Structure formats: C-alpha cells, structure tokens
Image (tube, rainbow, N blue to C red):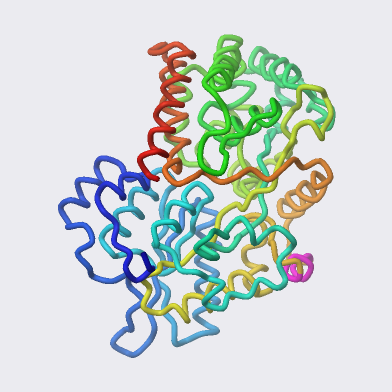
C-alpha cells in the first residue's frame, strides 16, 4: 500500500482506538469516501494548513503564539488550529482519518505512531526533507519505522513523580530523597500525609491508570510493556501491579475508587494534585510547567522509587513527549514539512515552546534559548540531564493493535478497585484482550 492509496476501513478505524460514538459517526459519514485532507488554498491564494494537538491551557497558549509567529514570518500561510483534550483527541482523529479529512499537521503520541504510520496515514518526513542534523543522538529514532520517519520528536521526556511542597508542609512531612527512596518509603510517606492532612487530601494520586507507572513497575522486575510484536509481560505481572494498587488504596495512601474516577475526568488545572489535594502526582516531566502554573507552587520533580534504594535501579527512560507528524494525504507537503522544520529547528520556535512539550531535542536550540527559560523549564532540564547516567534501555513503542493499551489497563484496573473483578481475573482478561487486538491487527 502506498501512502496515496491509504483508505481506512471501519474495522481499521476501530483498531486505531476509535470509540463507539465515533464509530457511529464514521458509519454515517461514509468511510473512505474521499474529500481530501485540507491544505487547500484560500480564495486570496494563501496556503491553508490545519494543525491539531491535545493539551492544556499552557500548551494551547504556547501553540497560539507559535502559529502567530510563523504566520508573521510566512504571510502566505494560514494555519487553522484544532486543539482538543486527550480523552477525545484520538476518537476525533480516527474519525477524521477514516473520512479522509485528517489535519495536515498532527501532534502524535508514541502509543499510536506505529498504528497510523503502519497503515499509511502519515507522511515520511525524512523523504520530504525534514532536517534532523542538530538533534541529540538517539532522539530521532523513536519516530522511525520501516515506512520512514513517521514523526519527529517534539521534546525529550521522562516519567516522574511530582511533589507539592505545600501539601507536605501542611502535613508536617519531609520531602523524600529521590536518589535513595524505595517503594516502601513511597507508601509510608503517602500514608503519613493522608493521616496528617484534612479529610479529602491524600498522600498521592492513583497510579492505576498511568501506563508509565506499569512500565516502571515491570522494568524494575526485568520485564517490559512491549516486545517488537507482542506484550513483554504475563498475567502474573499485571496481577502484582493491580495488587499493589489495592494495597495503596487499603492503606489510604491514595483516594477511594469513587474519588479516583472523579479525578480522572477533570482537566489538569482542576485535578487533585494541581489544587493541593494530593502530595504526590504521577506524570511526565514536560507537565511540570503546567502544574507549576496551575498550582502556583514550586512543584518538586522526583525520580521513581526503586526496590533497592539505588537511583540507577529505578530504570528510568527517555521518551519522546510527543511527535510532530503530517498527514500522508496533505495537499501541501512542502509547506507542512517547512512548518514542522521550523517547529523543530528554529530558535524562535524553541524560545516560545521552551520545555512545555519536553526538553528540546535539537541541541543548538536548547543552548540558544537558555536565557529564555523559566524556573520551571530549568527544573525540567536539570532533571532530564541529571538522570542520564541512570537510564535503563529505551522501551519499545506499542506494536500495531496495542495503541489503546492504556485504556484497557485502566478499564480492568477500575474493575479491580471497584470490586467487580479479582486482580487475577482482571490481569488475565487484560493480557487476552491486548494480545487478541495485536493478533487481529497483524
């Protein structure tokens, strides 16, 4: 299949993570009925490009500034922004792709890049001239596949635990030393915060729905989330993870199931961690900026605990925070790649983005924007550089068919914490469903 031949079926759209509601919409619009992917010229002859991303208030504001700056420097281009929330972003994108109406420039995630790239929905950026000559070693590879460069790394990221010092101070609990703390320390501290805080404030948010937490949990036990073409762990490993969540819940280190479910539906700035109702939060390093802004606090960034109390045994890893990808159906590939090239290599763009989408992978940009960085940016870069000697292997991205793994992990996790399923049954169903999805996608 060539990129120009790309047509996605309804079944294929469902495999891309399309939910039931969007599937109905897809059926109504007529899958693969044509219509193009935007990128048309306006009546005044200007090139029109559509840009889509998921984010938060901070990222939305940054992206608006990026668009404004690019259009000012390139008056022949009009960029139409299409922002969204993570929860609805992938259903919407799958619907657009299935209807041959994909935006020209797409903010892409590691979970789905092999799905979309492998099905011919994304443009080979390398073949179309994207410059990656100034990128740090190893930061381009995450976007590569046998089909080419399906997305360029928008920022270097790492899984972290954030700590709200206001919550710790109010509870009279000391912040941990993240170079030596263990999982037992994490539980002990979280329980102590809950016990010494007002009702409704907990030691930690729940790590149950965070696939990075499960990945870290597995890596410290010699396993991995994924192999090249399947899962890298067994049902017994998933059961152990769910049992650990239940242990935290029973100890009141984390909120009740109802409170966890309610928190999952909130925006970042209204989340329990941002409003000071939790001491620890499980996130990615690039989110520090947004949590600093939302909380008004000097949030601390911490390594994951380890089983041994040695930082290197936490087996952290660098991840592309997200990618800039392009639709294979764009009618303006040259202008699209020019814009992505500017996002990736321009000091002007780097000065606007700083670290909100992760630490710039372009080393020249990183160096030249140093005087533009905020305190939050500097904390993030210092953390990313500090953990470099401690990093474990880079995890493999999900194979085709496993892009919606986090949703499945979360669904069976909810069955466990609400008492609808034992951890053993939930773990077996998790494995069976994901392996079934991978098998049917191959």
Q: Residue at x 54, y 31 (%)?
A: 272
In this picture, which residue range is highlighted in magenta?
364-370
Q: Position of residue 191 (x, y in %)?
A: 67, 14
Residue furthest to the left: 28
The question of residue 127 being in magenta is answered with no
Q: Residue at x 26, y 40 (%)?
A: 20
Please indicate whether residue 290 sits to the left or right of residue 115 in the image: right
Tell me which corner region of the image, top left, top right, bottom left or bottom right, holds residue 8. bottom left
In the rendered image of this protein, does residue 309 appear above or below residue 299?
above
Q: Could you tell me how many numbered marks the image carries?
A: 0
In the rendered image of this protein, does residue 62 appear above or below residue 275?
below
Between 355 and 26, the one nearer to me in the picture: 26
Dominant secondary structure of the residues highlighted in magenta in the image: helix
Please indicate whether residue 28 sits to the left or right of residue 104 in the image: left
The quarter of the image holding the C terminus is top left
In the rendered image of this protein, does residue 146 appear above or below residue 212?
below
Between 337 and 281, the one nearer to me in the picture: 337
In the rendered image of this protein, does residue 132 appear above or below residue 226?
below
The quarter of the image holding the N terminus is bottom left
Between 221 and 156, the one nearer to me in the picture: 221
Between 250 and 11, the one nearer to me in the picture: 11
Q: Residue at x 54, y 69 (%)?
A: 65
Residue furthest to the bottom: 45
Q: Position of residue 78 (x, y in %)?
A: 41, 79
Q: Position of residue 273 (x, y in %)?
A: 59, 33
Please indicate whether residue 128 sits to the left or right of residue 25 in the image: right
Q: Position of residue 304 (x, y in %)?
A: 72, 32
Tell me which corner region of the image, top left, top right, bottom left or bottom right, holds residue 299. top right
Please indicate whether residue 399 sits to the left or right of residue 376 in the image: left
């Amino acid at each position: 299949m060539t990129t120009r031949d790309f047509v996605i079926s309804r079944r294929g759209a469902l495999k891309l993570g399309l939910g039931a509601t969007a599937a109905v919409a897809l059926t109504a619009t007529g899958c693969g009925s044509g219509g193009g992917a935007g990128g048309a010229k306006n009546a005044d002859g200007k090139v029109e490009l559509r840009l889509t991303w998921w984010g938060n208030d901070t990222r939305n504001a940054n992206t608006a500034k990026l668009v404004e700056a690019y259009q000012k420097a390139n008056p022949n281009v009009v960029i139409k922004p299409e922002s969204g929330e993570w929860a609805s972003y992938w259903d919407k994108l799958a619907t657009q792709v299935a209807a041959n109406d994909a935006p020209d420039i797409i903010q892409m995630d590691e979970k789905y890049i092999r799905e979309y790239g492998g099905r011919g929905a994304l443009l080979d950026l390398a073949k179309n001239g994207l410059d990656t000559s100034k990128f740090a070693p190893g930061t381009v590879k995450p976007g590569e596949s046998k089909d080419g460069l399906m997305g360029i790394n928008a920022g270097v990221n790492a899984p972290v635990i954030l700590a709200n010092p206001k919550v710790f101070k109010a509870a009279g609990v000391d912040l941990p030393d993240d170079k030596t703390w263990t999982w037992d320390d994490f539980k002990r501290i979280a329980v102590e915060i809950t016990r010494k805080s007002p009702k409704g404030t907990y030691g930690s948010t729940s790590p149950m729905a965070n696939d990075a937490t499960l990945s870290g949990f597995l890596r410290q036990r010699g396993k991995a989330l994924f192999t090249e073409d399947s899962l890298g762990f067994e049902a017994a490993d998933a059961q152990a993870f769910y049992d650990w969540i239940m242990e935290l819940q029973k100890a009141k280190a984390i909120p009740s199931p109802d409170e966890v479910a309610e928190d999952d539906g909130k925006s970042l700035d209204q989340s329990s961690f941002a409003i000071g109702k939790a001491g620890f939060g499980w996130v990615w390093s690039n989110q520090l900026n947004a949590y600093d802004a939302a909380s008004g606090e000097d949030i601390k960034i911490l390594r994951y605990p380890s089983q041994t109390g040695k930082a290197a045994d936490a087996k952290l890893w660098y991840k592309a925070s997200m990618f800039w990808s392009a639709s294979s159906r764009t009618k303006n590939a040259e202008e699209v790649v020019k814009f992505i090239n500017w996002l990736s290599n321009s000091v002007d763009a780097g000065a606007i983005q700083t670290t909100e989408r992760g630490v710039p992978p372009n080393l020249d940009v990183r160096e030249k924007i140093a005087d533009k960085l905020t305190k939050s940016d500097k904390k993030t870069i210092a953390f990313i550089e500090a953990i470099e000697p401690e990093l474990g292997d880079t995890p493999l991205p999900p194979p085709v068919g496993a892009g919606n793994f986090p949703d499945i992990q979360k669904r069976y996790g909810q069955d466990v914490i609400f008492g609808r399923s034992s951890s053993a049954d939930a773990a077996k169903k998790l494995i069976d469903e994901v392996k079934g999805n991978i098998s049917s996608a191959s």
